[in-house]
Image (cartoon, rainbow, N blue to C red):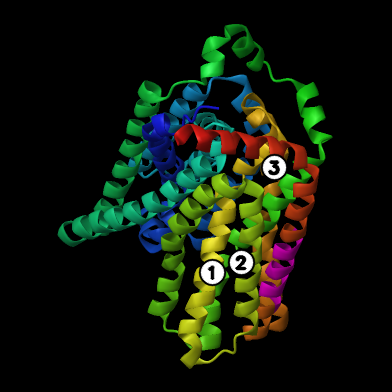
Amino acid sequence: MEAKLKENTATLVILAVSGALIYALPYFRNYYYDVFLEAFQLTNTQMGTLGSAYGICCLISYIFGGYCADRWKTKYLLTISLVATGVLGFTLLLYPPYPVLLLIHAAWGITSIMTFWGALVKAVRSLGSENEQGKAFGFFEGGRGITNIVQSAVILGIFAFFAKRMSDKMALSAVIVVYSVICLLLGIMIMLLYKDSSQDNENPQANENTKKFDWMVLWKILKMPTTWLATILIFTSYAIIISYYYITPYATAAFGASTLIAAALGYFSQYCRPIGSFSAGMIGDRIGVSNMVLIGYVILTIGLVGLIVLPGKATLILMLLVFIAVIYTSMYALQALHFAILVEGDYPVETTGTISMPLMIIGYSGEIFMPIIAGACLDYWGGTTGYKVFFTILLALAIIGLITVVIWQRVTQEKRKEIAMQRAFAKVQET
């Protein structure tokens, strides 16, 4: 199979940037919490409910996102999502009352997930051939990481510039304008540059058929063991990914790290993200995606064991940094391969939206209850013991993921052999 990822590099870059920046508007309030609170005259409870409104709509959107991705053209879904998110961003400049803010955040849950995420995953899958899926998603996740590093620094600079010369509220308005304009521009770029799957262009009748969401296909997918194995892989790794920020307060409590060092450890995750994502994608295409996933879980397990058994002494802070780097890098390596591994499950690209329904609904559900579990551990055991208990739960999830990928490899043995042959043939053609 002829490689096609290289010729789609520009599109992949735009998708990666879009996949990072569409979430800037729903989440930027957390980075400018006090300013946002004062500018919109909110209470802390109201501020929290904005996140709840967004989260609830995201969960509902995961249910219907797959339907949208397989029902309408990817280009239109991505464009509409980005433009709508940007337009909603501009409405913040009116500094509307709390009920309107609530509706805006709820709407973002639809525009950033229901009409966007499933279509985005489908778009990335379509950019690479079967033996390039690891690289496609690795570069995609790595690109999102780099985008977040750059945009956070640039936006912080813009905020500081306007805050110093005008006011904090004007600085917040500048941030809102920049994020909103970027979303609009990205939507226009995707409309102009993204090309739908060549298979659809070559077979209009097939393209017409894929516009009709087939519930029988969903039922067939739900009966496939690979669907539930992939769901477990996403669930176990994502539950760890959304829990990593508990390492920051743990560093303070157990190792006596200063607030500045603890914050730096949190930001350090975004620097590990491109390393883990790029490495996982490139190595995954060379040795097989599931083999790379297996390695990722092994490394993640080692990192978590080190985090748990390392004595809480200030003199061991550098050793803590090593284990944290191992955890951050491996968890983002796993995230990069969440959907790349589907190629070994033999799911056609045109059914990506359908397969993503159970994967997203169950796989991402950890975002709802992992914070509750963490809070319960910290309240019941208290201090460093509570953190260690919670990290032990994360370790158990990593081990479950490790066992799951071994089972996956046995179930997908024939398809993996086929992909390996394609990989070998591609190497022969290169030479």
Amino acid bearing label 1: Val
Check if mark 2's residue and mark 1's residue have beta carbons within 8 Å. yes
- Rounded to the nearest angstrom, the CA distance separating label 3 from label 1 is 26 Å
Q: Residue at x 76, y 38 (%)?
A: 414
Q: Residue at x 36, y 22 (%)?
A: 192
| Nearest to the observer: residue 144 or residue 201 | 201
| Nearest to the observer: residue 326 or residue 178 | 326
In this view, 414 is above or below 150 = above
Q: Position of residue 267 (x, y in %)?
A: 42, 66
Amino acid bearing label 3: Leu
Dot 2 or dot 1, earlier in sequence: 2
Disc number at residue 359? Answer: 3
- Residue named by callout 1: 326
Disc number at residue 299? Answer: 2
Q: Tell whether 268 sits left or right of 237.
A: left
Label 2 sits on a secondary structure element that is helix
